[in-house]
Amino acid sequence: MKTSDQLNSAWRKTASAIYRRPTDSKIFGSVEIDVTELETWITEKRKNGIKATLTHVFVLAAARALRDEVPELNSFIRRGNVVLHENINVMVSVLLRDTKMGSVLIKDADTLTLEGLIEVMTSEVKNSRQGSENKTMQMKDKLARIPWPFRAWVFRLIKTITMDWGLSFPSMGLSASNFGSFMVSNIGNVGLDMGYPALFPSSNVSFVLIMGGVNRKPAVVGDQILPRTILSLGAALDHRVVDASHGGLLFRYLKHIVKNPHLLDSPL
């Protein structure tokens, strides 16, 4: 595991000064992944009572990528330096009711098995639908009640204290790690095949992973062209803390898990 000192290369320190988030520090990337066999594996899981989905698989796979392959993605900028998050927590966008979107925070996601992750996500989504949202979402509602333009002033003050200065007030739900290490959103569920997400200025995540549409497409398998199930993935990365090569390592790890999903059944 790398330390914060090892992450603070000359380029990283320079990047934190010359880029401002999120206006110009984004790297966008996308891939298409053949999930034909993975969907078969998920179907077998569901027959055995484990209600797995592609979202569960990629949330857990991405969390383990940060643990095993790309620890640089588990970091953020604080006072001009790259700092590692203490844990690998994941903020997942979910559909709560009708068309209302919300988010649930999965703590220590990399330590869970697939079945454990499903249980935690199911519980968190249920709590959100019943109105018991996490402190980050509660802060959003409080901020929305402040009249304009005072709302913008309060937001900038909170951002300065938490994001720029790195101070935390847990009792108020304010910290530099409110949104976890990264965010995942499945826009395929709302009819979009591909999307390129924003790096939210109120978060300290190094990347946002977007799951797009799942479509049947012709693909070359061996020497044959066959119909396959293809998933589109997109990501926006914070160029202050990572480079395009780190995004490549992330996608390579995700492809590895797609071919070996049984690895998600094993604990840390």
Image (cartoon, rainbow, N blue to C red):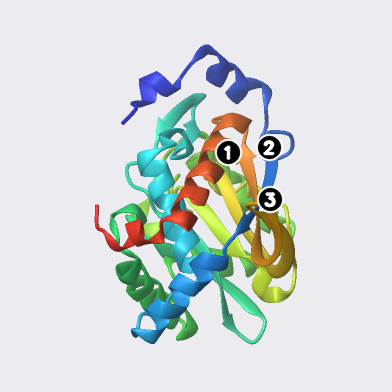
* CB contact under 8 Å: marks 1 and 2: yes
In primary-sequence order, the first of circles 3 and 2 is 2
Residue at numbered disc 3: 198
CA separation, marks 3 and 2? 11 Å
Extreme residue in the top direction: 10
x and y percent of residue 104 in the render?
46, 67
In primary-sequence order, the first of circles 1 and 2 is 2
In the picture, measured across the screen, residue 202 lies left or right of residue 214, that is: left
Name the kind of residue labelled 2 in the image: Ile
Q: How crowded is the residue under tag 2: few (<14 C-alpha within 10 Å), some, or many (20+)?
A: some
In the picture, measured across the screen, residue 82 lies left or right of residue 24, that is: left
Residue at numbered disc 2: 27
The one nearer the camera, 84 or 267, is 267
Residue at numbered disc 1: 247
Task: Identify the element where label 3 is drawn.
Answer: loop
* Nearest-to-viewer mark from 3 and 1: 1
CA separation, marks 1 and 2? 9 Å
Q: Quarter of the image containing the N terminus?
A: top left
Task: Identify the element where label 2 is drawn.
Answer: strand
For the question of whether residue 174 can be seen, the reply is no
Above or below: residue 98 compared with residue 211 = below
**Residue at x-position 43% and y-position 75%:** 52
The one nearer the camera, 139 or 213, is 213
x and y percent of residue 66 in the render?
42, 43
Q: How crowded is the residue under tag 3: few (<14 C-alpha within 10 Å), some, or many (20+)?
A: some
Q: How crowded is the residue under tag 1: few (<14 C-alpha within 10 Å), some, or many (20+)?
A: many
For the question of whether residue 23 can be seen, the reply is yes
**Residue at x-position 28% and y-position 55%:** 111
CA separation, marks 3 and 1? 16 Å
